[in-house]
Amino acid sequence: MRHVGQNDKLRARSRSLAVRCSVAALATAAALTGCSGSGSAPAGRQGPADAPDATSARLAEQRRMVAAARKWRLDQVPLTAPAPPKVKPRITAREGFEVDHQEDENLPPVFTTVPTDKKIVFLTIDDGAEKDPRFLSMMRELKIPYTAFLSNYLVKDDYGYFRKMQSYGNTVDNHTLTHPYLPGLSYEQQRDEICGMQDIMEKQYGKRPEVLRPPYGDYNQDTLRAAKSCGIKYAPIWNEEVFVDHWEYREDDKRLRRGDIVLTHFRGTDEWDGTMVDDMRRFLDKVTREGYAVARLEDYL
């Protein structure tokens, strides 16, 4: 049976205002003008008593974001993602990532990029090994959405950490019970890994996910059949992977694309030369510098 492997992951188990100015420049602009123009309401849409309140709130939020960016030592304030589309894009399997009977059995598509004309990327974080409270604070203060793909053997010692993450508006999804190489298992064994994690996710987080990331990005037809039987509708993998000290790319031109899914891991100093905060600083500085905002993956599925 044909399987699709992602060899580039085998060793990895191991941001209303489009602000593009620097943190220092934004601080000055916020105090003087709010970097405004894009944040003004259309004429006639608000009464004279409302305008000062709206402006004050906007400037206060700008100042708060500047302070947060300084606190976490970012080069710039992260950009704000546009509103989610009213009509979600049609997600299909990436060419070359299909399995037999992909369409006629309506199997969950494996994809690395979401169709969009917006300059956005999606942040996904795998497994759950590192549970850094500073990471939760950083992402909450900077209003960065992300999706966590959890494996039970790594999160069962502290389900509460990920409940707090969920309470901040982030999504938790399925990454199997024990993070095995799924194509090496029988259909029933794969189904146990996926459905078993569905049961735990429902018990611990109140919902059975519709999104699965197969460990290592490896899967075959049985994987997607088993996933579908467990209620999975999508199987996103990634187009770039960020580490604390470098990026890796799937495409030869080594650049971000609109709608790309970016992978990183719950890792800390035990395995990396830095923390999750360091990792996120690298990620956010790069995407902001290149004009991308971080959007919520599930808003497009």
Image: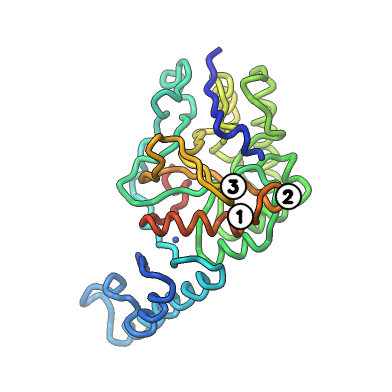
- Disc 3 is placed on an element classified as strand
Three-letter amino acid code at the position of disc 3: Ala
Residue extending farthest top: 1
Pointer 3 residue? 148
Percent x, y of residue 122: 46, 48
Q: Quadrant of residue 52?
A: bottom left
Instruction: Using the image, tell me which numbered label, if any, was put on residue 82.
Output: none
Report the mark closest to the observer, 3 or 1.
Answer: 3
Identity of the amino acid at label 2?
Answer: Asp
| Amino acid on which disc 1 is placed | Gln
State the residue at coordinates (46%, 39%): 249
Please state the horizontal and vertical placement of residue 2, each as a whole percent of the image.
53, 15
Q: Residue at x 55, y 25 (%)?
A: 5
Distance Cα–Cα, label 3 vs label 1: 9 Å
Residue drawn at 70 percent across, 35 percent down: 177
Tell me the crowding category of disc 2: few under 14, some 14 to 19, or many 20 or more residues within 10 angstroms, Cα based: few
In the image, taking residue 184 as reference, residue 210 lies left or right, namely left
Name the residue that disc number 2 marks: 270
